[in-house]
Amino acid sequence: MSDTSIPYALAGTQRQQDWRVITVVGIAHASSHFFQLLLPTLYIALNRQFGYDFVSLATLVTLFYLVSCIGQASSGFLVDRIGAVPVLKFGLACFVLAALLIASANSYWILVLAALIGGIGNAIFHPVDYYILNHRVSPQRLGHAFSAHGFTGNLGWALTPVFVTGLSSLFGWRVAVYAVAGLIALVLALVWGNAAYLRGTTASETNSNAEQSLASATILDTLKTLLSQSTLWGAFLFFAFATAAVAVVQNYTIPLLSQTYGVDELRAGTALSSYMLAAAGGMILGGFIASHNPRAELVVFISLVIAGIILAVLGTGWLSARWALVLVALAGLCSGVSSPSRDLLIRKATPKGATGTVYGLVYSGMDVGSSMSPLFFGLFIDAGWRQVPWFGAGLAYWVAAGLALYVAIVLRQRALK
């Protein structure tokens, strides 16, 4: 049975219900980002315990994201047909199982199995999260919902190293990972206890004929319908290019600041942290902007163009080290501001009855950008062209900005017909 067929729980005001949904979805999203950094945080511990080299350990992360990419593109179909809540419970249960396998692992193949199961769990979150937010939160609070969603994801990334390394130093890495399993189990219990709120329908939601037809169509027919829409291809490419730029910053900020500006590793690492924190703050600011600005594409375009300019300026090498550190944070702020308006723009491009499918397809562009960008720009760094990644990331942001305008223009033309 689809979630949309179950009446929305009546408890308190609509505002309270909205923020309850936003909070639960945000915590679940934070757990996905939290788990994404679990294996990288354990690299040193696993190397010491088993003697695995870092190529072998990095392969585990590659497998995790490969499964996540394939699963994200396909899990949206499942969300549209059986509802978001069962799929969300399944994804969290996969994380718990994967963490238990890692904590008890005594061979590399157990870690491989854990990475594959974790990737399956990670694959469901964007289709599930955006399905719930789009169907359960009042339209006037969607901008805030999307900004909170992005903020909690960044928060999850920030918490993993502190949680895992802190417990590892006190009790050992196995106890730390068992604690991760317990923590995610608590999130699963939270979702279970709030299932009525997550699967209800809002007063503004209607089940149109178009929605019913797509939701009940075969997977092949739905895919044919969606892939014929240029806006969705534009959205997929938008995420691929925008995430490629972010991947450059996440993977190469420390060596690039060191090689270009002579910044030591500690300060360069702090700069990367400032980028992530500024991006999180930008998401909150972007939520207010998105809630009061119907032209979402302009917010995305302006913020990403500015972010691209900042990265290109960093690539010139003309700045002092102090200004370079400041501009890295400013680039993160601009990137964060664009996120809620970006999500609202994708919502406009989503046909009724295909919310999970569309978000699964277009957000798989993130995995494409994340997987290809570090390898591509790493070749330039190895060749000694250390400024190219900055310029490439700036260009990727500009392309993404143009794609956002393209999607909005096509949607506007379609509405006029």
Image (spheres, helix red, strand yellow):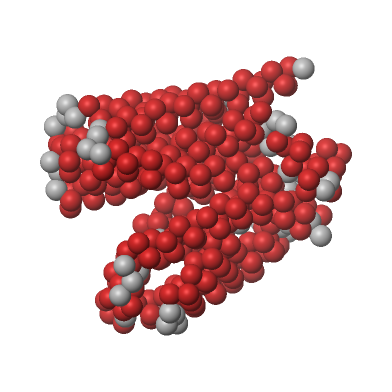
- Which residue is painted at 42% across and 61% down in the image? 59
Q: 400 or 183: nearer the eye? A: 400
State which quadrant residue 93 falls in: bottom right
| Quadrant containing the C terminus in the rendered view | top right
Residue 115 in sight from this viewpoint: yes
Q: 136 or 72: nearer the eye? A: 72
Residue 132 in sight from this viewpoint: no
Q: 411 or 111: nearer the eye? A: 111
Answer left or right for 184 relative to 137. Answer: left
Q: Please state the horizontal and vertical placement of residue 132, each as a whole percent of the image.
A: 65, 51
| Quadrant containing the N terminus in the rendered view | bottom right
Residue 397 drawn above or below residue 112: above
- Which residue is painted at 77% across and 54% down in the image? 81
Q: Please state the horizontal and vertical placement of residue 124, each as a whole percent of the image.
A: 61, 57
Residue 45 drawn above or below residue 349: below
Give the total of numbered labels. Answer: 0
- Which residue is painted at 65% across and 22% down in the image? 410
Q: Please state the horizontal and vertical placement of residue 292, each as a whole percent of the image.
A: 54, 30
Q: Please state the horizontal and vertical placement of residue 327, each as a whole percent of the image.
A: 26, 34
Q: 37 or 158: nearer the eye? A: 37
Residue occupying the far front of the picture = 383
Residue 116 drawn above or below residue 263: below
Residue 417 drawn above or below residue 41: above
- Which residue is painted at 58% across and 34% down in the image? 235
